[in-house]
Amino acid sequence: MRERIIQRLTERNTLMTPNAWDYLDRQENPSDIIDEMVEEKKDLPFPLGRDVLRSFVEKGKDDDESSSTQDLEVSIEILSDITGESTCTGQLDDFVDYFSSRYEKLRAVISKRRESQGAMDINTIKKRKGEGKVIAMVGDIYSTSNGNKVLKLEDPTGHIKGFISQDSEAYDADLLGDEVVLAEGSVWEGDGDYDVTFNIDKIVRPGVPKISQKKKKDFEGKMAFLGDLHVGSEAFIDDAWEHFIDWIKNDEGAQSIRYLIISGDLVDGIGIYPNQEDELTIKNIYEQYEEMARMLSEIPEDIQIIAIPGNHDIVRNPEPQPSLPEEIQDMFSDNVRFVGNPSFLDIEGVKLLLYHGNSINDLSDLIYEVSSDNPVRAMKEMMKRRHLVPVYGKKTPIAPEEEDHLVIDEVPDIFVTGHVHHTEIEKYHDTILINSSTWQDQTDYQKMRDIQPDPGKLVVLNPSSRKVTIQSFV
Ligand SMILES: [Fe+2]
C-alpha cells in the first residue's frame, strides 16, 4: 500500500512529510484518501504536509455529515431513571430491601458467567463442606496479624466466615465491602474454637464480557459532552464559555453535533462546602439556574441537550438523584431535557449510561491504583463490579430504594461521568468511557485540597465510527 501511495504522489511531483504519514496511517482507508486527493486537487504542495492532508480529510467528513444530519429526528428513550419512581420511606427496612435488590440484580449478572456453574447457596455449602463456590455479598473485611484477610460472606440463605490467605490469587482482588462476587474455595470444618470457614482461593466479579466484534451503530452525526459548569461560582471561566458558544454556533466542525450531554453540577449551588458564599458571584440558587438557562439558550436549538444533576444541584443528595424540579426545568428552552442521576438512555440505538461520579472519590480512597486525577480507572472498577457506588457508607450517600438503580444491569455503549473536573476518555472492551471537563477554574477550596482542574474542554464523539476528539476553549 505504501509503495502505491508513493507512486501516486511522485507522479504528481510530490512526497509526504513524516508527520503526514503518521496522520495518514491513522485513517481508515489511506490509499483511497490519496487517490481522491490526487484526482480532486490540481496542485499538490511539495512536500505534502499533515495540515493540508488533514484539512482535505476533514472537509470530506464534514461534507458527508452536514448533508446527512439535516432533518433527523431526536429520539431518546429513558430505560432507567429514578425520577418519579422513588419508593424511599426513610424506614430502616428500606435498607434491607435495597441490599436484597442489589444482591439479586448482581447475582443475575454474575450467574451468566461460565464460572458460576455449580455455585451453591451458603447454607448448603456450610453443611456439605469440601470444595465449592458461592455467589455472595461481601461484608466487613479486616486483616489478621499474620497479614491474611478475614471477611463475612452473605446470601439470602445465611452467612459464612471467609478467609483469604496472602498467598492466594484472591488476595489481590481489591475486594470492597458490599460488592457481590463469585467466591471459589473450600469449607473448613469448625471445632470448639473455630467457626466453619470458607477458605477463598479465587474471586470472580460480574465483569463485562469481552466482545471482539465492534457493533457498528447507525447513528448519524455526533454527540458532545461537557459538565461541571458551576454557574454562579466566581471561578466560572466566562472566556472559555464564550469561545465554546462561538464555536458551536459558527464552526463547520460543530455542525454535525446533534446531542449535547451535561454530566451534572450545572450550578455551584449554595452552602455546599464551608465559606462557599465568599466564592460566589450569584448568591441565589434560582438566579444561578436562570443564568444557566440563558447560557444554554445561546446553543443552536436543533441541538438536543440532556442534563443530569450533580452534588451541587438543587435535588436530594443521596443517590439515585431525581431530575431537577419542574420550576427549574421551566426556565430552560424546549431543547433541554432533564433526567436523573444516574440515567440509562437509548439515543437512536446508542445506549448511554450517565452518572455524575460522586463515588470516584470513594474508589480513589479505597483502591491503590485509582485516583481522582484518573477517573476512567475508577469507571473501569465500577464496570467490573457492575455498580456505580460499589461501597456503602463512605462519602457517597445512597437512598435505599426498593430497587437498586445503581446496578449497571446492561453494558452501555457510552459511559459518562464528571465530578472530578478532569477530561479523560478511554475504551473498555466495547464501551467508551468519558469523564467530561468542567467550566470552573481552580477554587480556593480546591487549592487548599490540591485539586488541579482541567477546564474548558468539549469531548466530541461520533458514535458510529467511535472516533473521539477533544476541543479546547481555554
Ligand atoms: Fe463539580
Image (cartoon, rainbow, N blue to C red):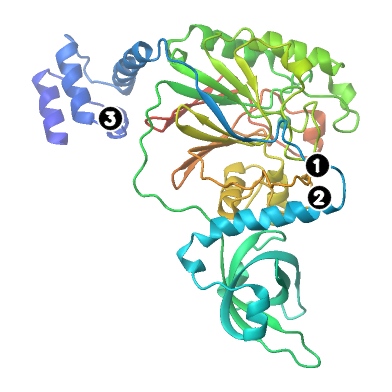
Image quadrant where one finds the N terminus: top left
Q: Nearer the viewer, mark 1 or mark 3?
A: 1
Three-letter residue code for mark 2: Asp
Q: Mark 1: which amino acid? A: Cys
In percent of width and height, residue 86 lies at 75, 37
- SS under mark 1: loop
**Residue 110 sits in quarter:** bottom right
The residue located at (56%, 8%) in the rendering is: 301
Q: Is residue 361 left or right of residue 304?
A: right
Between 11 and 167, the one lying in front of the other is 167
Near mark 1 (Cα within 10 A), the count class, few <14, some 14-19 or many ≥20, is: some
Residue for point 63% across, 20% down: 337
Q: Secondary structure at mark 2?
A: helix
Task: Assess disc 3: are there few (<14), some (14-19) or many (≥20) residues with their C-alpha within 10 Å of its C-alpha.
Answer: many
- x, y percentage for residue 398? 77, 45
**Residue 187: image x %, image y %?**
64, 84
Location of residue 267 (image quadrant): top right
Circles 2 and 1, Cβ within 8 Å, touching? The answer is: yes
Compare marks 1 and 3 and give the one earlier in the sequence: 3
Residue receiving disc 3:
24
Residue drawn at 66 percent across, 45 percent down: 406
N-term-proximal mark, 2 vs 1: 1
Q: Nearer the viewer, residue 393 or 335?
A: 335
Q: Secondary structure at mark 3?
A: helix
Q: For mark 2, what is the residue?
A: 94
Q: Nearer the viewer, residue 36 or 345?
A: 345
Q: Which mark is residue 88?
A: 1
Q: Is residue 393 visible?
A: no
